[in-house]
Amino acid sequence: MTGSKGADVNHQETERQGWRDMIDHITIAVSELEKSKSFYESALEPLGYRLAFGKEGVFWAFDVGGSLFEIQRTDDKPPFTRLHVAFRVHSRAEVEAFYRAALDAGARDNGAPGPRPDYGENYYACFVLDPDGYNIEAMINAPAQG
């Protein structure tokens, strides 16, 4: 796989080297904070994310291992209509659990769990649209286990 600067990227190797945790936090703007809070609480639970802290009516932060995914209320329509966030997981079962939980929480299907050979030989992912229409992905790039 090739990165944005044309350098070869080996996702399994970077994960072994501990580079997986390079992002401290990401914040996205949402139009309905409480609706999005409920959605992400349910959708991210199979991935180990938990509601960590926040301020009623302003923002909420979900934590896994010190990395935060935050949602923040906006008075305007969210500024990005083509936002894509991918959560790296540890197994294909986690991809499938995320997909089921997200749909149960009200997401719209944007690609059922399955191989994505265009992204890599071992790339397995699913895609859902959150309450604001953001494309949320759960993915793993490793050979199938078992």
Image: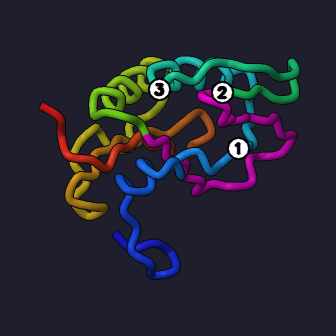
Q: Earlier in the sequence, mark 2 or mark 1?
A: 1
Mark 1 is surrounded, within 10 Å at the Cα level, by few (under 14), some (14 to 19) or many (20 or more) other residues, namely few
Q: Is residue 54 left or right of residue 41?
A: right
Check contact, mark 2 vs mark 1: CB within 8 A: no
Where, by quadrant of the figure, is residue 97 drawn?
A: top left
Q: Secondary structure at mark 3?
A: helix
Residue identifier under label 2? 63
Query: What whole-number distance in Å separates the C-alpha atoms at marks 2 and 3?
Result: 10 Å
The three-letter amino acid code for the residue at tag 1 is: Asp
Instruction: Count the numbered circles shown.
Output: 3
Where, by quadrant of the figure, is residue 41 drawn?
A: top right
Q: Secondary structure at mark 1?
A: loop
Q: Is residue 94 left or right of residue 53?
A: left
Residue identifier under label 3? 47
Please name the colour scheme applied to the rendered image.
Answer: rainbow
Q: Which mark is residue 7?
A: none
Query: What whole-number distance in Å separates the C-alpha atoms at marks 2 and 1?
Result: 10 Å
Give the residues in magenta.
63-88
The residue at the point 65 percent across, 27 percent down is 63
Q: Earlier in the sequence, mark 2 or mark 3?
A: 3
Residue identifier under label 1? 24
Q: Secondary structure at mark 2?
A: strand
Residue 133 x %, y %: 56, 43
